[in-house]
Image: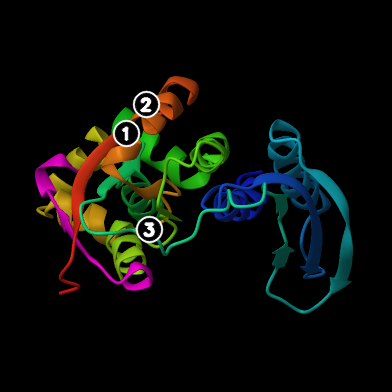
Amino acid sequence: RAIGRRALAVNLSDLAAMGAAPRAAPLSFVLPPALPLADFDAIVDGFMTLAAAHGVTLIGGNITRSPGPLIIDVTAIGTVRRRRALSRAGAGPGDEVWVSGEIGSAAAGLQSLSAGAQGGPAAAGCEAAFLEPEPRVRLGTLLGRNRAASSCVDLSDGLADGLHQLAGASGVGLMVDAGAMPVSAGARGWFEGRGVDPVAAALAGGDDYELLFTVRRKDRRRLDAVRRQARGVPLTKIGVAVRDPG
């Protein structure tokens, strides 16, 4: 179930980062002969459950056999109104840098799962964050529809990578306050318990699938409108764009 859900979730997150509403997806499999039918059914069920939650129609695909490994191929298709699409370019000096949700949980969860650790409720919460990422589809569409964000990217490869992507595409530098970063309590506990700086680990870790975006100061009222409609998704200001790309 988690594999099928993730296969769609990570693609919906890409649509969210562009302000697009998901519409449809083809799904293709390359299946090893030894894969149990129950596992295949669970993968499809995980995919279809998330698809139903976001109004995504399965529009076909393909199934073929191979000695291995298991391959799942998804193409997510969405729509966005003209001049409402978000991109990684567009941030300018003085724009505020914002991030949704919390970061670090998925990286801690992957470590916990890989180690077979029994870290209690906090570790279990981090494992769930890795296994069942929640794409910020509604937030992305609201940012685009309200023209609240000047640039946007999803955090599939970590916050540090997302910052690098926005800065490079926009031709600016990004100054980030480490103390403002919303590292989850579970991730802090996991990393500190292993002698690792939780801020550095959260910066480098991936699979959060939150949205990192910039907002022009004159558009703060538009962001306030997005926040009211975002159904409780936390938004945290973590820095500012500067003219010097270095």
Badge 3 amino acid: Gly
In the image, residue 140 sits, relative to residue 53, either above or below, namely below
Q: Closest to the observer: 129 or 55? A: 55
- Range shown magenta: 168-183
**Residue under the point 56% across and 38% down:** 145
Image quadrant occupied by the C terminus: bottom left
| Labelled disc at residue 224 | 2
Q: Earlier in the sequence, mark 1 or mark 3?
A: 3
Looking at the image, is mark 3 or mark 2 nearer the viewer? 2
Q: Earlier in the sequence, mark 3 or mark 2?
A: 3
Density class for disc 3 (Cα within 10 Å; few <14, some 14-19, many ≥20) is many
| Labelled disc at residue 220 | 1
Secondary structure at badge 3 equals: loop
> In which image quadrant can residue 200 be found?
bottom left
Badge 1 amino acid: Arg
Residue 26 seen in the current view: yes
State yes or no: discs 1 and 3 in contact (Cβ < 8 Å): no
Residue 179: percent from left, percent from top:
10, 43
